[in-house]
Image (cartoon, grey):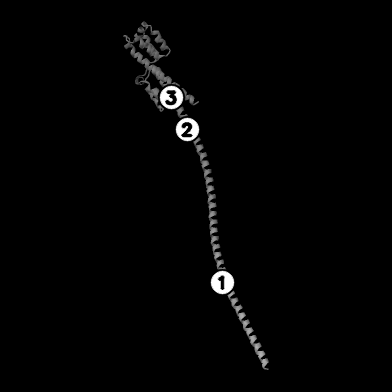
Amino acid sequence: MSSDAELVARAVDQATKHLQEEKQKLQSMVDNSAKMAEETMAAAEKANANYQRLMKEQEVLDKENCAIEVKQAEHRVLMKAGDAWMHERKDRLSKLDAIRVQVGALAQAHDARAAAQATSHASHALTLGIIGLTTALEEGRPLAPHVSALSKGGAGDELVEAALGSISKSAQEKGVPTSSQMEYQFRGGYLSHFLAKMAVSMKAERALADGNLAAAADTVAAAVQGTAAAAAAEPWLQGLRARAAADQTLQLLRTHASALAASLA
């Protein structure tokens, strides 16, 4: 009996030890599992924190990328607007250049017409003035009214002004002798008799007939120089030279009027 009880007690004791050992193993396993769970939770929290950080960083990058894309889009829009503005400006400048060319052509045409009209007016005024001056010379009348008319009509024309400036004050106020008056004074007076004696009458008369008044004046002046006829010949010589100068001026004005008329053809 006692040996059986000892066996049972020993068996119970061994079972109890075994249970305790298993309990300790289970406790150790539980402790290990809790620790692993804690470590897993810590790792999960760390991973979640990293994920949240990465998400925030990605959000920032997305915003930056979006801002960059917006700026790039704005830049493209500005570039297109600039290109459109430059194209429009070039087109406008091209049109303005074309308008300037047209305006310039019109201005040149207007200036040409104005110049032609001015030349035509000057030619007409000069022609009328020459007719009046010719009539006054043929009739021996004062030249002043016609000189004044020519001066007004030819204002700014240097040739006309120079030609009119060569007409003496005496010729303007009193006129110059006519051709018939000069011939009558030459043939019917003391001067012709004196020149006939000196064998120069025919030469002077021929020069008068040819209209070479300056040559006639020079011939007579040379013949009477230092003689008693010099004083008597002086008024006639002055008239002759005045008429020669007036005729020369008239011829110059006629040539100039012909040139103006030809420029209008």
Observer-nearest residue: 42 or 83? 42
Residue 140 location, quadrant? top left
Q: Is residue 265 left or right of residue 143?
A: right
Observer-nearest residue: 26 or 177? 26
In the rendered structure, find residue 111 and report the number of the disc placed on it. 2
Observer-nearest residue: 132 or 95? 95
Tell us which disc is closer to us: 3 or 1. Answer: 1
Q: What's the residue at 47%, 24% (across, down)?
A: 261
Secondary element type, mark 2: helix
Residue of label 1: 42
Q: On screen, 112 above or below 9?
A: above
Residue 143 location, quadrant? top left
Q: CA distance from mark 2 to mark 1?
A: 100 Å
Residue of label 3: 126
Q: Residue 146, can we see it?
A: no
Q: Position of residue 259 (x, y in %)?
A: 47, 23
Cβ atoms at labels 2 and 1 below 8 Å apart:
no
Q: Residue furthest front?
A: 3
Q: What's the residue at 53%, 50% (across, down)?
A: 79
Q: Residue furthest bottom?
A: 1
Q: Type of residue at label 2? A: Asp
Q: Residue 214, can we see it?
A: yes
Cβ atoms at labels 3 and 1 below 8 Å apart:
no
Chain-order first, disc 3 or disc 1: 1
Q: Position of residue 110 (x, y in %)?
A: 48, 33
